[in-house]
Amino acid sequence: MLLSFSILVLKAVVCRALVANSLLSAADDGCNVEFAADPSVDVAGIYAALQAARSSVVATYPTTYLQDHTTSVYSDLLNLTQVSVIHFFSDMDVDCDGLNGNTDGDPLTSFGALDAEQVPWYVLPASLAFKEAILPNALGAIICNGNLFYAIFGDTNGASPEVIGEGSLLLGQTCFPDDEINGNNGHEALDVAYIVFPQEVPPGVQENSIDIEALKELGDQQILLLQQDLGISLQPDCSDP
């Protein structure tokens, strides 16, 4: 949603305390998180391919309201054989708008009132979503801390300046479970890969919640097609010795 500079200086939104969330697993490698990628996905291989595919710049945005760091969005992989994606590398700050969000934020998200504690979502600048015709709730694949998790395009950043690199509280804490992620403390390094599937929307998105199983099913389908397009082999299962 449109957010003022005074409210979100450095994107440090004050979230209310988070209780233990049933969607988070104790598994350090992310294999057991309900919206994690299938173990056959070569996360490291995809990450390396994304790093190499950075020649066609769609737009460039700051990652903080101080505009001390910027990052670019790339369209090198927009027209592959089976999938079409845009991607960028950024930090991950926390968006706590919506249901059960912080008291100083917006009670709504851009396409509903999603629950920041229960729904994995990522945020895009409003101008980027418009320019690239990205559908509301579009599938995203987020590579963070060596894992890949699925999320939806759940909120926009329309502040001045528009910044990039935000996720819901659930997504941030799943990505970085040991870093005390909250509205005042995000992940600062620009090493999180955001893969956006502009026209792919999982079924089961409601006003406050989503169908996590449907998100994972579509996510696995699309990311494995991307992996095939990139010529990357399947990985062994997490349970393999």
Image (cartoon, rainbow, N blue to C red):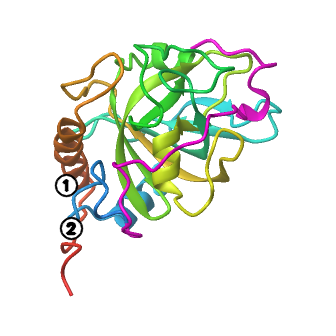
Q: Per the image, is 5 magenta? A: yes
Q: Is residue 54 visible?
A: no
Marks counted in the figure total 2
In the image, which residues are magenta?
A: 1-29
| Picture residue at 54% right of the left edge, 16% below the top | 126
Residue 163: x percent and y percent? 66, 28
Q: Quadrant of residue 134?
A: top left
The residue beneath circle 1 is: 228
| Picture residue at 59% right of the left edge, 44% below the top | 92
Q: Main secondary structure of the magenta part?
A: loop
Answer with left or right where residue 168 lies relative to residue 43: right
Alpha carbons under labels 2 and 1: distance apart? 7 Å
Q: Secondary structure at mark 2?
A: loop
Position above or below: 200 against 172: above
Residue 213: x percent and y percent? 18, 41
Q: Secondary structure at mark 1?
A: helix
Answer with left or right where residue 155 lies relative to residue 150: right
Q: Quadrant of the N terminus?
A: top right
Earlier in the chain: of badge 2 and badge 1, it is 1
Front-lying residue, 195 or 57: 195
Q: Decide: few, some or many residues near mark 2? Use Cα within 10 Å; few <14, some 14-19, many ≥20.
A: few
| Picture residue at 62% right of the left edge, 60% below the top | 179
Residue 165: x percent and y percent? 59, 38
The residue beneath circle 2 is: 233
Q: Per the image, is 237 magenta? A: no
Q: Decide: few, some or many residues near mark 1? Use Cα within 10 Å; few <14, some 14-19, many ≥20.
A: some
Front-lying residue, 43 or 82: 43
